[in-house]
Amino acid sequence: MPYAAQVVAPTTAERVHSACAHADSAMLALPGLDPVPTSVHLLRQCGDMVMAVSATSTAAGLVFGCGTSGSPAVLELTDQAPLQLRERVRALVWLRGWVYTVPAHAQRALAGAVAADHPHPALLDVGHGSTLLRLVIDSAVVADTSGAAAADREQLRDARPDPFCAMEAGWLQHLQADHADVIDRLARRLPHALRRGALIHPLAIDRYGVTLRVEAVEADHDIRIPFETPADDIESLSREVHALAGNPFRRGLHRI
């Protein structure tokens, strides 16, 4: 049987899902209009993005006027680290497709369905000051310090966000505040020249590994350190982090 290489990073589609789940801000761009912010956004497994915009915005009026034909649109989402860094942006995502209005009679029902997966206080304003729109996605691009990568609609439908998405922010904040020793041991896996005089922070944790942000004098560098085995639950994730922090690193470094 041929040897199968160990997966050391999420797929592009998984990265899109995770970045969208982490993103706390998004801007909707429609032809001929200035981008407008969304108060809610949820990338659903069926391959569309449900979002809320001001009911009085020009964007809501344009989409309503397009009727069932919809309007081409791009949604830009920003994934920021939950830490105070020199540059907090971890990734940008652009979702391109066609945006449609949600019928008035279906607004509250859809808001309830969104709340089941993504409870957000702004959903209470749906039908009052805000309205829901639905972006049917044709393609997605995610960009970070390594460059940009694309995923299509089918790849997005087959992917899931990282299983630890909802807990990642708390873990990173806990590491930064209470476990400088763990960060220091992880940082020892980096080339000495890279970490000399630099500030090093935990930037991301997913089932495949840990990413460190190196704030050097001249530039920032994001370095992924993969786990020996992808983690499937909290216990295995903790075990893999401690293995990286306590054992010689045998698998090399992967810039992201």
Image (tube, grey):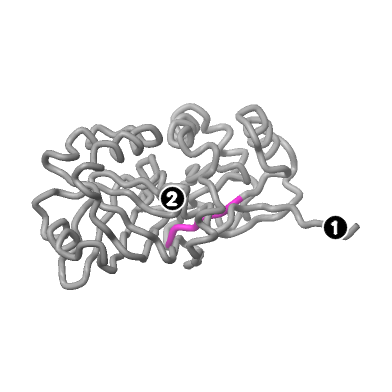
Residue 56's disc is none
Residue beneath the point at 25% across and 42% down:
106
User: Does the image show residue 198?
Assistant: no
Q: CA distance from mark 2 to mark 1?
A: 31 Å
Task: For label 1, count other residues whose C-alpha is less than 10 Å away and answer few (under 14), some (14-19) or many (20+).
Answer: few
Which label was assigned to residue 3?
1
Q: Is residue 64 left or right of residue 154?
A: left
Whole-percent x, y for residue 44 in the image: 42, 47
Compared with 180, 64 (above or below) is below
Q: Is residue 35 above or below residue 171?
A: below
Magenta: predominant secondary structure element? strand
Residue 27 at what x, y percent from top left?
25, 57
212 up-or-down from 182: above or below: below
Is 190 left, or right, of 126 in this rendering? right
The residue range painted magenta reads 219-224
Q: Is residue 57 left or right of residue 135?
A: left
Q: Which residue of the protein is positioned furthest toward the bottom in this rendering?
A: 32
Q: Is residue 223 magenta?
A: yes
Q: What percent of the width, then of the height, locates residue 224? A: 58, 52
Residue in view at x 32 percent, y 59 percent? 76
Q: As rendered, which of 162 and 144 lies closer to the eye?
A: 162
Crowd class of label 2 (few under 14; some 14 to 19; many from 20; radius 10 Å): many
**SS for callout 2:** helix
Give the residue number, with chain letter if any, for mark 2: 19
Q: Disc 2 residue type?
A: Ala
Q: Quadrant of the C terminus?
A: bottom right
Q: How many marks?
A: 2
